Image (cartoon, helix red, strand yellow):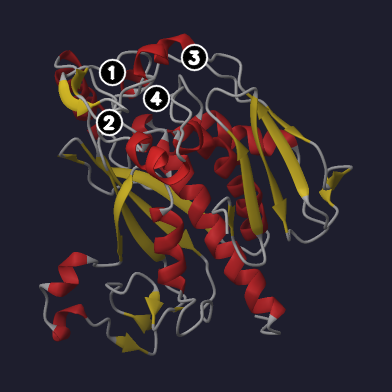
Amino acid sequence: MSGNTFGTILRLTTFGESHGPALGGVLDGCPAGLDLDEALIQAELDRRRPGSGGLAGTARKEADRVRLLSGVFEGRTTGTPIGFVIENTDQRSKDYNQLKDLFRPGHADFTFQAKFGLRDYRGGGRSSARETACRVAGGAIAQELLRSEGVSVLAYTVELGGVEAQVLDPEGAQGRAFFSPDPEAPARFEERIRQVKAQGDSLGGVVEVQVLGLPPGLGEPVFDKLDARLAYALMGVGAVKAVEIGAGCRAARSLGSRNNDPITPEGFLSNNAGGILGGISSGQPVLARAYVKPIPSIAVEQPTVTTGGQAASIQVGGRHDICAIPRIVPVLKAMTALACADLLLLDRRLGRER
């Protein structure tokens, strides 16, 4: 297995590198008859594209214009593979020439060299976050599929650089700076970013994802649990280092009497389970959090080694984000949509109509 394909029924395969001529993908398994056009996909890509991150974002400017190549006719999916391409237009590969013989701390340089015996040092090749544009394109289609079934996905920032946001308005977060669910948090986020940017350093954060309207009964009870699939989807995004479902780590420090979600004739009284019981959706909102590490490309001098094993030091210049947030938020939303849509189609394949 090459690790370039995600999904069982709804399968997204991506291709391309950060400094190649283009990125792209093929989404197979999408049912026929779904309303779809490029503008719908483009709207999601615009939320992720380089230059959209404000103070936290890279200076690289990419239009990230998507072009559909197949699988759509007269604005509707045909049931055949949906091919798309996104051209790279603002590469500056020369910025990476000095890194050719150095391993960047926190990057996949060392491990790519160990696995393949060579690496694309121009921005990281396939390990570059630029690849996630393809996930956002595929996820936009998955979101339309879910929307046709009354299911929606929200993603928003609950912490950036140690500065927390209250979850007051998740839906409004979609049009707010940093995808903040707290109207007052963006100003605090910006102040934290200014402090760290002046030091040449970077920041991490926490993104919360909600799936609303998912019917009860999705997910399999053993290896294909909904929470296992969701964690796999979110952990597959390069900067994510931990995932929580529902109460997450707090559940380990709780009591059963507090962590259980009591059930009444009117429904559940709480949602510590994050909408998933026994690996199967309960009908409550599915809730997950992804913990995102700081961007590893920093101007602070760090020790490293050369590809020949000699001691060296490195300061990474070029155009890099200070924090993966907010640009990673649409990526996590896309991966959540792909995972849920895949399980929905798997349920239908198994003859379980809802």
Q: Residues within 10 Å of mark 4 (few under 14, many from 20)?
A: many
Alpha-carbon distance for marks 4 and 2?
Answer: 17 Å
Q: Residues within 10 Å of mark 1 (few under 14, many from 20)?
A: many
| Disc 4 residue type (three-letter) | Gly
Q: Report the residue marked by disc 3.
A: 93
Give the amino acid at mark 2.
Answer: Pro
Q: Which mark is residue 296?
A: 2
How far is mark 1 from mark 4, CA to CA? 20 Å
Residue with the mark numbered 4: 53
Pointer 4 and pointer 2: residues touching (CB < 8 Å)? no
**At 39% across and 75% down in the image, what residue appears?**
276
Considering the image in quadrants, where does the C terminus appear? Answer: bottom right
Q: Are discs 2 and 3 less than 8 Å apart at CB?
A: no
The alpha-carbon separation of the residues under discs 2 and 1 comes to 9 Å
Neighbour class for label 3 at 10 Å: few (<14), some, many (≥20)? some
Pointer 1 residue:
316
Q: x, y percentage for residue 348?
A: 69, 77
> Mark 2 or mark 3, which has the lower sequence index?
3
- Given residues 216 and 297, the one toward you in this image is 297
Side of 101 relative to 34 (left or right): left
Instruction: Classify mark 4: helix, strand or loop.
Output: loop
Q: Secondary structure at mark 3?
A: helix
235 vs 256, nearest the viewer: 235
Residue 107, given in percent of the width and then of the height, sits at 32, 35
